[in-house]
Image (tube, rainbow, N blue to C red):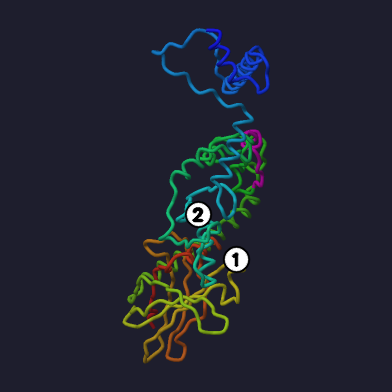
Amino acid sequence: MSSLEERDVGVAAAPGSSSGGLGVGAVGAAVEAVAGVAAMQSEDVGIRREGPEPDQDQPPKKRARLPEGESGKLEERLYSVLCCTVCLDLPKASVYQCTNGHLMCAGCFIHLLADSRLKEEQATCPNCRCEISKNLCCRNLAVEKAVSELPTECTFCLKQFPRSSLERHQKEECQDRVTQCKYKRIGCPWQGPFHELPAHEGECSHPTKTGTELMGILGEMDQNHRRDMQLYNSIFSLLCYEKIGFTEVQFRPYRTDDFITRLYYETPRFTVLNQTWVLKARVNDSERNPNLSCKRTLSFQLILKSKVNSALECSFLLLKGPYDDVRIKPVIHHHSFSNDTNETDYVPLPISDSVECNKLLAAKNINLRLFIFQVQK
């Protein structure tokens, strides 16, 4: 038995050792070292080795919660993994991915497609340079769900909330959210945190203003209301005309053959009120490099292609199409068409901002609805 022990120990002994006693000491030291590492690992993961063996019939214990520092590091790593590859920020709405899986927020994705249309280039992913388009890219619902559950800070109370519930908290629940006095309509300029609102409204002097003071404020409100009602009344008046026509129009992009090519849009010919028409549109009023501008606009003109025997006086307006979500404020335009004046001037397409313009530029075609009202003489 001793010879077997000596032979086993001799394998573990250091070369050149003269006795088996040193080999036993080396093995003991190795066993102690391994035991020490195992103990350290057990402490790191929060597992206790002491006490009786766990009962096999009992359900498994829950995983130990990570320390605060480790949790913060995990969130930082998730931020870096789930952020948009263009703006390097976490997406706030839809998330798109290229064919290689690189993520882009909806705003940056639309902006890339709009820029490529203005430059007459194929849009590419900023990470891997693969082609991107609305047909090639798809939404990543898993990332959208993961981002919505990540914590973020309320800008008012500085507390942490999941992104999915932050908007509701800031609009309805946060006691520090900025709010306005309920007497704002009669001129009170106060705004402050929500928890101070009852105290302010109890001391607000505007409810006690005289009738003369209130009449001045109400006059300004009536003027703004009158301006809005004038537009709607004009539209209702046009709807009473005998000859009214409307059609769905589709603006298609094309480029000029000039040395400096410019992007234009044009619709196929269409017939309204027994006349043939065409719509044209341009970006930033034919600015040389609209892709370098942050502010982008579209303007359009209506062209009569038919020959007429007498002047054709018309009113017209463009509205959004039935399948688009772009916001367009109706504006009525007037023009007297004849064989000599068959084109209107370029007028702005009444979209709200550059974001809406980018949506239109990123689309393959722009679909709108045109109304033409013939003025009776």
Label 2 to label 1, Cα distance in Å? 18 Å
> Which residue occupies the foreground of this view, 316 or 158?
158
> Which residue occupies the foreground of this view, 111 or 61?
61
Crowd tier of the residue under label 1, counting other residues whose Cα lies within 10 Å: few below 14, some 14–19, many 20 or above: few
Q: Position of residue 117 (x, y in %)?
A: 50, 69
The answer to which quarter of the image holds residue 252 is bottom left
Q: Locate the C terminus by quadrant.
A: bottom left
> Which residue occupies the foreground of this view, 17 or 46?
17
Crowd tier of the residue under label 2, counting other residues whose Cα lies within 10 Å: few below 14, some 14–19, many 20 or above: some
Up the image or down, 8 lies above or below 287; here it is: above
Instruction: Identify the residue at horizontal 50%, vertical 82% (top origin).
Output: 256
Query: Over which residues does the magenta segment extend?
Result: 188-201
Up the image or down, 103 lies above or below 119; here it is: above
Up the image or down, 148 lies above or below 349; here it is: above
Q: Position of residue 181 (x, y in %)?
A: 61, 42
Does label 2 or label 1 sit earlier along the sequence?
Answer: 2
Amino acid type indicated by mark 2: Ala
Dot label at residue 295 = 1
Query: Label 2 belongs to which residue?
Result: 106
**The stretch drawn in magenta includes residue 196:** yes
Are dots 2 and 1 in contact, CB under 8 Å?
no
